[in-house]
Image (cartoon, rainbow, N blue to C red):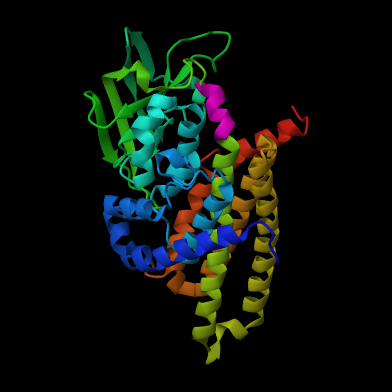
Amino acid sequence: MRRELFTADHEAFRRLVRDFIDKQIAPNYAAWEKDGRMPRETFAEMGELGILGFALPEEYGGAGLRDYRYNVVLQEEAARAMVTLGTVRTQLDVILPYFLEYADQKQRERWFPGMVRGELLTAVAMTEPGTGSDLAGMRTSAVRDGDHYILNGAKTFITGGLLADLVIVVARTSSDPDNRRAGLTLLVVEDGMPGFTRGRMLDKMGCKVQDTMELSFQDVRVPAENRLGEEGAAFGYLGHNLPQERMTVAVGSVAQARAAIAATIEYTRERKAFGTPVSSFQNTKFELAAMSAEVEAAQTMIDRAVADLVDGVLSGADAARTKLFCTEVQARVVDRCLQLFGGYGYMMEYPIARLYTDARVARIYAGTSEVMKMIIARDLGVS
């Protein structure tokens, strides 16, 4: 269906990204999957092209384009090539907004130029063993000691933790028995700080190029000048960026579902059963047609939500609706596409198998489908 979301500038960016992915990402992707990471030099190459700095201010080498549609283009082009860009999506869509919103002038001068160039990689450490989505139940603590905070705790499921030079850690700096959400603070821990250690790299069923780590902090002395925003205000900061974080998952889900359909069409045209192309069977035609209709409906929902996000009017409930619907569409589409591959769909040498395993986490991270339903129900006035 016709889309009206993008301008000529977005399409020029799309051509730049597509060329880079086809030449630099796709040919190396299989090796990166085995390594479990995208190499640092590729981040630097993306930085040199301006891919990492489009949202950062011009005075630090960026383009000053705080327009989420560029993020969408980046995701769509990666999905078209059936690859992911390592931890780039997390850095640009989830982490960078915290720096843009809450970094002071000195912090911007210290960190932004390196981010633009792809020399400073980032991660955000929220989730703890045993807490899951319950951020208010966080146990990682930071106690003020003069012009430092003494940080102690452990984090898990940290995307990009292996290569990160800067880790935004959510820690409890005070407690209020009447308000569990109060007292959380954002501290930027830098690589090499004594007491900051990286644990094991977690072995995931999918998203193999996105390294996912356990991190621990034992008496880490974090300078107070590394605090992002005000002390005790982190819960509100985290909520402020949640609509974009959830949109990021939804955008990727629809783009990857579209890629799955394209791969399945190509395969069923070439594959024969009983001497006839699989694409000629009525069941194949009906399945592909039904999936196409679902993806187009999800795309329309995405484009409306992205437009609202760019305009600053996307509500948390509508972001939840979008993530819930689009990730469920992705799950149905990729599963049905794999079925049309038959036994070959179960083989990891075919990209549909990777799309299948990658898709499963979309209904879990950035808030599970169950959490999305709770948000939507609350918006409907159902208590």
Q: Where is 76 relative to 125, above or below? A: below
Horizontal and vertical percent position of residue 284: 62, 77
Q: Where is 146 relative to 165, above or below? A: above
Is residue 51 found left or right of 189 in the rendered image? right
The magenta segment: 234-241
Q: Where is 52 relative to 83, above or below? A: above
Q: Where is 227 relative to 348, above or below? A: above
Horizontal and vertical percent position of residue 375: 67, 34
Is residue 37 found left or right of 281 in the rendered image? left
Image quarter hosting the N terminus: bottom right
Most common secondary structure along the magenta stretch: helix
* Residue 63 falls within the magenta-colored stretch: no
Horizontal and vertical percent position of residue 50: 42, 52
Q: Nearer the viewer, residue 267 or 251?
A: 251
Residue displayed at 70% across by 50% down:
304
Residue displayed at 55% across by 18% down:
181
Whether residue 114 can be seen here: yes
Q: Nearer the viewer, residue 26 or 362?
A: 26
Q: How many marks?
A: 0
Horizontal and vertical percent position of residue 160: 35, 42
